[in-house]
Amino acid sequence: MEYPATSEEVTLCNAVVRRLGPRYSAHLMQTGETYRASDLSVTGAVGAAWGISGVLFLIGGAVLRLTPVALDAFAHPFGPRHWAFLVGFFVFMVWSEGYRGFQKNFAPRVAARARYLRQNPHLGHALLAPLFCMAFFHAPRRRLMGSYGLMTMIVVFVLIARQLPQPWRGLVDLGVAAGLVWGLVALAVFTYQAFGTASFDHPPETR
């Protein structure tokens, strides 16, 4: 003989479904009740917003920390070698870090993964949304290596710059900051495309 579930059992089942993820939300539970889609929508929306804003905060914070040191470099005497290094390194960082690193890889992937999280809510992914959007976990091995590689390159340049005297330190920081600013603009553009248009052609590359 079957008995109707108690309110405590219904609450427990809903909590289990909430943790298991969205693929279970459409399943009919034993009590005849389903997990509300509106709750999943809130989790996805908050997770996506937290992911994008967290990444923007990390990059923007790095730019703010590097900018004063970079500008201080111009208070020191400049020679031809300093100007040559400034132009060469600036162009290199904008191309390698800004264009190839951020615009072609990092920024569209962050936007795509935020869009994926919005459409496929998961509590754990939402809590760690900035790391999820940056593909530091729940991603193919190749993508994990690329994500950690880009962050490692930026950290290495910053650490090297700290050992240099001015104006060399400022010139290195200026190049790194330029690449980061390019990344901020690219991320803003791709975020608009991901959430402001019906389709977004960049894959989230989830595992």
Image: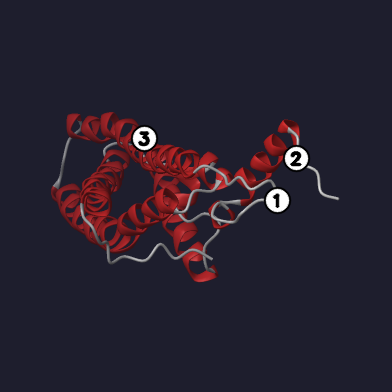
* Residue at image point 75% right, 41% down: 4
Quadrant for residue 47, please give it.
Answer: top left
- x, y percentage for residue 105? 33, 62
Spatial CA distance of label 2 from label 1 is 8 Å
- Amino acid residing under circle 2: Ala
Q: Which quadrant does the C terminus fall into?
A: bottom right
Q: Secondary structure at mark 3?
A: helix
Residue annotated with mark 1: 30
* Residue at image point 19% right, 57% down: 91
Residue annotated with mark 2: 5
Residue annotated with mark 3: 57
Spatial CA distance of label 2 from label 3 is 46 Å
Q: Mark 3–mark 1 contact, CB under 8 Å?
A: no
Residue 57 vs 1, above or below: the answer is above
Mark closest to the chain's N terminus, 2 or 1: 2
Q: Secondary structure at mark 1?
A: loop
Spatial CA distance of label 3 from label 1 is 44 Å
Disc 2: CA contacts within 10 A as few (<14), some (14-19) or many (>=20): few
Mark closest to the chain's N terminus, 3 or 1: 1
- x, y percentage for residue 54? 41, 37
Q: Mark 2–mark 1 contact, CB under 8 Å?
A: yes
Marking on residue 16: none
Camera-nearest label, 2 or 3:
2
Q: Would residue 193 be found to the left or right of residue 56 on screen?
A: left
Q: Secondary structure at mark 2?
A: loop
Mark closest to the chain's N terminus, 2 or 3: 2
- Amino acid residing under circle 3: Phe
Using the image as rendered, state which of residue 44 and residue 15 is in the foreground: 15
Instruction: Residue at the far front: name it.
Output: 1
- Amino acid residing under circle 1: Gln
Camera-nearest label, 3 or 1:
1
